[in-house]
Amino acid sequence: MVSLKHSKQLKWDSEDEGLESWLPLVHSPPRRERVLEIWIPDDVLSLILQFLVEEVRNTTNAPHERPVPIIVAGVCRQWRALCISTPSLWTDIAIRPYGGKNGGRNIAANKAKLCDLFVSRSGMRPLKIKVETWMESTSFNESSPRRVKLYPDYVSSRRWKEVQALIDTIASSAERWHTLDLKCHWRIIRQLFRALPPRSTPMLEKLIIEIDEFPEGITQTLAHFATASTLRSVSFNDCAQQYPIDLPWEQLHSLKVQFYNRLQFQRFFGNLTLPSLVNLQIIPCDDRGTDVWWQPTFSQLLDQSSMKLRRLVLDLNVLNQQDLLAALGSAPSLAELELVVPCSGSNQWSHSVFSVQMLQHLTLESIHHKSSLASQDLLPNLQILSLIVAIHWFPPTMQALISMLESRTTSRSDSFGTTGLQSFHLQLNAPVESSEPIERLADELFIEDVARHLRSELVHCSKLYTCIVMESWNSVAFPVPV
């Protein structure tokens, strides 16, 4: 049993956001305490703390704020002991080697100590490593600046030694990496890969790379992860050129990529074989409405790989309506589809890609009109449909949307041997560049009345789970795992 105790707030040195300023929270006993008459078993409290850490862990992007496990461990002796004896609280390591109130000074040395502390306390559990050397924020306060960045080319030789020591510290835990998330300058990524011994990532399952200012003229390919036998999920933010990283493409289950134009799309997918891929997400690098999709290359990818895609997520800035029809027609195995339909001043045309006409194409024909499932029926195996749209899209398309959903949830779809639609998610947002709050737009468009009508029309579709969410561009149907 353990009592919940709260100590007086421990001193926090606001002038020094380095590791030394909060290490006493972890290694020294707290000051005078007062006991609350609440008793919770250790196992229950441990679950509560794990839930707390999971919920709060990624809510801040201020580089010098204390990690959540450190804060929790500083509450009282009991919490400290419980935190130290719970390895799962220390498995997520976020390293941001920049920050502080003095204009972004380098605190890489302190971050190396932080990394060592988390690695030692996480036991032998798999680790999720996140390294960010740049960050953008819309906030204007000191704890979350608009733009902070570590510029490798402008770091002094002494500071770079600290950065290199941090890189070596991170690399030393590679045998326990489960997820590696890098939001870094290419030089940092290259140095990290060079610090890794061969075949040192036997547990790596997920790789995320977001490069700032991708350098031109890279001639050396990094081949370390080519032998990562457990790697299943990869995400790249910028495929402006052939990515200089060798990967075991044939074993990937999930791939997320970004492009600026069709040529990059063709170069990236033209020579790939992805026989195990079931989840593909393609989004543009900007919102200028430039076509990225090239259907011949996509069809070739499907044919060469004998791929059976299950989930496809598309930002409709990447393709026009004709390409969307062709893409969906070439992937009948799809069971999960998410379409993001942004609408802003720079890409109004994308609003028409997923239109009434497209909804009609997705509507299954009645069993009374044909005896078997015809080839023109798109996505016969669709089970989950998610639409993330600007709010203006909804009212004009509602009747066509209802007809499409009904065709996929009644006995007509079952009669063709298909499972039928199980889940429909609709997320309505204010246009990207709109200055009006979404509540006002919703009132002007009578969104609540329209949504109520949609639900009433679908009430007989008892098997269909319907979720309508306001003001969320982050996927509800397919949330990104923390």
Image (spheres, helix red, strand yellow):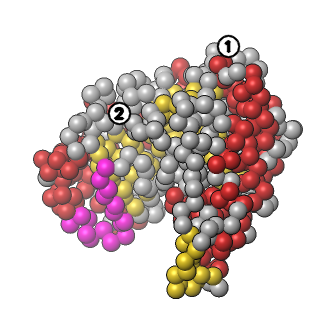
Gap in angstroms between the C-alphas marked 2 and 1? 35 Å
Asked if residue 435 lies left or right of residue 193, the reply is left
Point out the tag, 2 or 1, that comes first from the N-terminus.
1
Between 410 and 203, the one nearer to me in the picture: 203
156 in magenta? no
Near mark 1 (Cα within 10 A), the count class, few <14, some 14-19 or many ≥20, is few
Number of the label disc, if any, that sits on residue 321 = 2
At 39% from the left edge and 28% from the top edge, which residue is drawn? 287
- Residue 119 at x, y percent in the picture: 76, 53
Would you say residue 414 is visible in this rendering?
yes
462 in magenta? yes
Between 113 and 458, the one nearer to me in the picture: 113
Would you say residue 47 is visible in this rendering?
no
Asked if residue 209 lies left or right of residue 169, the reply is left
Q: Which residues are magenta?
A: 455-471
At 65% from the left edge and 74% from the top edge, which residue is drawn? 78
At 59% from the left edge and 81% from the top edge, which residue is drawn? 3
Where is mark 1, residue-wise?
217
The residue lying furthest to the top in this view is 217
286 in relation to 432, above or below: above
Where is residue 85, by image quadrant? bottom right
